[in-house]
Amino acid sequence: MRELRELVDWIIAKGLSSDDIGDLLQGVAEELVALGYPILRASIAMPTIDPLQRAISVAWSRSSGISLEVQGHDDAGQKMFRRSPISYLLENNLRQGRWRLPTDDDIASYSLLKELVDLGATDYLLKLISFNGGTALAGVGFSIAGDDPDGFSEKQVADLDIFLPALALTCYRIASTRVAADMLAVYTGTRTSGRILSGQTQRGEGAPIYAAILLADLKNFTSLNEIHPPAYIVGWLNEHFDAIGRPVEQEGGEILKFMGDSLLAIFPAEMENPAEACHRALSAAQKAMQANAALNRKRLGGAEPEILADIVLHVGEVFYGNVGAARRLDFTAIGKAVNEAARMEKLCDTVGRSLLASQAFVSHLQAGFEPVGVFSLKGVTRSAEIYALAE
């Protein structure tokens, strides 16, 4: 008993010093083995809050150590869920299940149990601990599979409840911290989320930075809303934003916001030498145009509408920080350069070109653009010399 109380203290200390559930599980499994548990495999499973992941499962094996499985929201993820007895407990509102192997009748229903039998397991115990938090982080599942001929003793099964609450709370602390970081990155971008988590949450807090600016706009999207159902519109919008946004992120850009059918991104630069950021922004724009064209070719083959994109590139100083109401903030970039980029986008139809850049942006590149004219931009005092990507 004293050893299990000491394990509780170790779990709590680990939860305060580490964000690695795998490291936590390995320590718990090895300690239980040292206490006489005939553990062949142990695992921790938790739901997640992530657009790409439904749940994760971290497993420790006596022979191979730590492994990680990620369950997606797709059919493959659902199949992974069905292979585990967790699905049985959840569907039957149970908090504990035990399967004696290899004779239990339910073995055929769950591929995980069949895999454990092949490894020599004789007993499998699964316990669920619920969280009452009103979020998708609904709880944690802890399982152990043993290979002793007699399985786990009744005392060993009962003693698990001594440390499982501490283990569940530690997993919740780690998962909630990770959710905060990951979901902020999903909604605000990696660089912005880091600033928010570091405490930059006051309205007006921020700083001027020098950056290359990329603004992309999907053409004729308003008219598509008039003739197609919203579900189709949202699907197409997501496909095109994915095609345009992926190269932006690959080139080190930060997508600040989606504004209806437009995307705003920045590539932070050193004011003394912005050429590198401009090169990355141009590379992202070219790859985005290519990806968008490939998507349109694929869609036209299925008799769906072609959705073209206009992209403008600019460079200048912007204010990067918190703007908004007292309890509803947006961490974004504003300033003269952003306004000029928005005005430049309106010129794409005027000059019949889909990728335009300002003179300030082009001045940092050696070649690749040709002048298309000097234009007045609404709300901007000085006329703007505009360039298009050379054809």
Image (cartoon, helix red, strand yellow):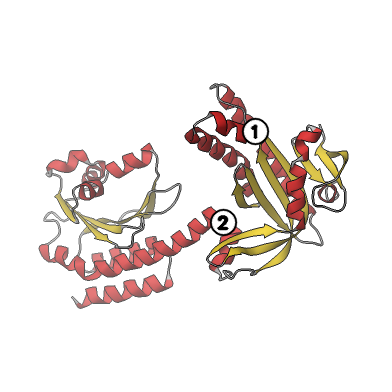
In which quadrant of the rendered view does residue 17 lie?
A: bottom left
Tell me if I can see residue 180 in this picture: yes
Residue drawn where x is 66% and y is 35% of the image: 219
- Tell me: 332 left or right of 335: left
Quadrant (top left, top right, bottom left, bottom right) of the C terminus = top right
Pinpoint residue 202: horizontal percent, then vertical percent: 59, 71
- Residue at left offset 25%, top offset 49%: 86
Q: Residue at x 35, y 64 (%)?
A: 171
Label 2: how many residues lie within 10 Å, few (<14), some (14-19) or many (20+)? many
What's the amino acid at mark 2?
Thr
Q: Which of 118 and 51 is in front in this view?
A: 51
- Left or right of 18: which side holds 168? left
Provide residue 124's location: percent of width, then percent of height: 19, 53
Secondary element at tag 1: loop
Which residue is label 1 attached to? 220
Q: Residues within 10 Å of mark 1 (few under 14, many from 20)?
A: few
Expressed as whole percent of the image width and height from the top left, the position of residue 336 reads 77, 57
Closer to the camera: disc 2 or disc 1? 1
Q: Position of residue 35 (x, y in %)?
A: 21, 69
Mark closest to the chain's N terminus, 2 or 1: 2
Quadrant of the image containing the N terminus: bottom left
Q: Residue 190 carries which label?
A: none
Secondary structure state at the residue bearing disc 2: helix
Residue sitting at x 52%, y 66%: 327
Work out whether 64 lies above or below 167: above
* Residue holding disc 2: 188
Query: Spatial distance from mark 2 to mark 1, Cα to Cα?
Result: 27 Å
Query: 243 or 25, which is in the foreground?
Result: 243
User: Number of numbered discs present?
Assistant: 2
Q: Nearer the viewer, residue 42 or 236?
A: 236
Residue 256, placed above or below residue 370:
below
